Amino acid sequence: MKPLLAMLLLAVSLQCVAREALPEAADPVLEKRVVKLTSELRCLVCQNQSLADSHADLAIDLKNQVRAQMQAGRTDAEIRSYMVARYGDFVLYDPPLKMTTLLLWTGPFVLLLVGLLGLGAYMRGRRRRLADAALTPGDHARAQALLRGGNDKP
């Protein structure tokens, strides 16, 4: 039992790998700028987190690139343009509305409309099927007999 417990503790401890703290810029104003810009950019690995929030290796590399470009004197717009040129409009949390992103902006509404039209068609067909399935007088009498607790013959 003790070797099993020791192996379990060893396996759990391997999951707790510590990393070094991320380097911060010597200039706190620059670091605020890095955080602000990276919070507007999407992590390409996580896709539902910003670069500022992500701990993926690629996100850390991209944050370091942003920091280095800021230290080199580039503006936020230049850095944003560089990221879009390299990774596409997907890297932006708020992509611009243009022909290449039109499906991105209208896709959810189109899918919702198609779903509602499909639901409406299904409900109309169901209503017609139920209307066509009217009870005959014999079926009605048999149902009444069953409800009264009798047998299924009128």
Image (cartoon, rainbow, N blue to C red):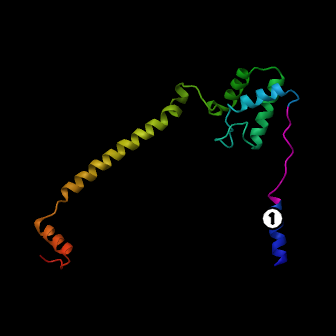
Q: Position of residue 25 (x, y in %)?
A: 86, 30
Residue at 16 percent across and 63 percent down: it is 135
Mark 1 crowd level (few <14, some 14–19, many ≥20, 10 Å Cα):
few
Helix, strand or loop under label 1:
helix
Task: Estimate the x, y position of residue 28 in percent, counting from the top left.
Answer: 84, 28
Work out whether residue 82 or residue 66 is closer to the camera in this orientation and state it: 66
Question: Is residue 23 shown in magenta?
Answer: yes
Q: Which residue is mark 1?
A: 11
Quadrant in which the C terminus is drawn: bottom left
Count how many numbered circles sit on residues in the image. Answer: 1
Q: Amino acid at mark 1?
A: Ala
Quarter assignment of residue 138: bottom left
Q: Which residues are magenta?
A: 14-24
Kindly report the secondary structure that dominates the magenta region of the rendered protein.
loop
Q: Where does the image place residue 93, in percent across and percent down from the top left?
A: 63, 32
Dividing the picture into quadrants, the one containing residue 77 is top right
The answer to whether 73 appears left or right of 102 in the picture is right
For the N terminus, give its image quadrant: bottom right
Q: Is residue 133 left or right of residue 37?
A: left
Instruction: In the rendered view, tell whether residue 100 sits above or below residue 135.
Output: above
Q: Residue at x 82, y 70 (%)?
A: 7
Identity of the residue drawn at 20% across and 72% down: 147
Residue 87 within the magenta-colored segment of the rendering: no
Name the image quarter holding residue 98: top right
Extreme-front residue of the structure: 148
Residue at the spot x=62%, y=30% of the render? 89
Q: Position of residue 55 (x, y in %)?
A: 75, 43
